Amino acid sequence: MSMIDDFYSFSETQGIARNAFYEEKGDGFTVVTFSEEGETDCLYNVAIVFFDDNNLVEVYVRKYIKNYDEFTLLKRINDWNCKYSGITFFIDDDMLTIKSHFTTGGDIDPVLKEMVDEMSIAKEEFPLFS
């Protein structure tokens, strides 16, 4: 069974239907995206990239921001990149993003843990920017 199938199976055990996700296939990978509630009136976008080797995965947690001072934001991003290991913070097209890239050995558990950990960090750090 592939990690994508494991992800959907786990989601169904949590009461989340498969149609709650958007899936797009590329050359050698599949991206699964969905929204997650953040602070009041804020949705985070979560994207998981499953590579066809059933081993490599990328997890992204993103928040759209529109009113920010670029210098302050870039300083914060630099601080976060020093504070947290194993993940990278960046801004692209007004999307404040956390990214991780790792191997799983075909096990979905590290993917789920990383997704939850990144969401927790985003909910702690990102509310400073809207």
Image (cartoon, rainbow, N blue to C red):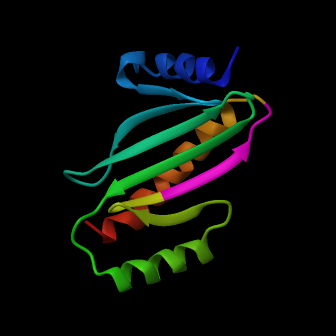
Q: Nearer the viewer, residue 51 or 99?
A: 51
Query: Which of the 4 image quadrants contains residue 126?
Result: bottom left
Residue 101 belongs to the span the image colors magenta? yes
The residue located at (35%, 60%) in the rendering is: 93
Q: Is residue 67 magenta?
A: no
Going by the image, does 97 lie left or right of 52?
Answer: left
Residue name at image x 32 percent, y 50 percent: 38
Magenta segment: 98-105
Q: Within the image, what quadrant is residue 6 found in?
A: top right
Instruction: Specify the principal SS of the magenta part.
Output: strand
Residue located farthest toward the right when viewing the structure as drawn: 105
Name the residue furthest front.
Answer: 27
Residue 99's spot in the image, x, y percent? 55, 55
- Image quarter (top left, top right, bottom left or bottom right) of the C terminus: bottom left
Q: Is residue 61 above or below residue 129?
A: above
> On screen, 73 above or below 118?
below
Foreground pick, 116 / 53: 53
Give x and y (percent) for residue 113. Answer: 61, 42
In the picture shown, does residue 73 fall above or below 20?
below
Instruction: Tell me which corner region of the image, top left, top right, bottom left or bottom right, holds residue 50.
Output: top right
x and y percentages locating residue 17 in the rendered image: 39, 16
Vertical arrangement, residue 124 with respect to residue 82, above or below: above
State left or right for residue 48 relative to residue 56.
Answer: left
Viewport quadrant of the N terminus = top right
Task: Count all numbered tags in the image, as a single digit.
Answer: 0
x, y percent for residue 111: 63, 38
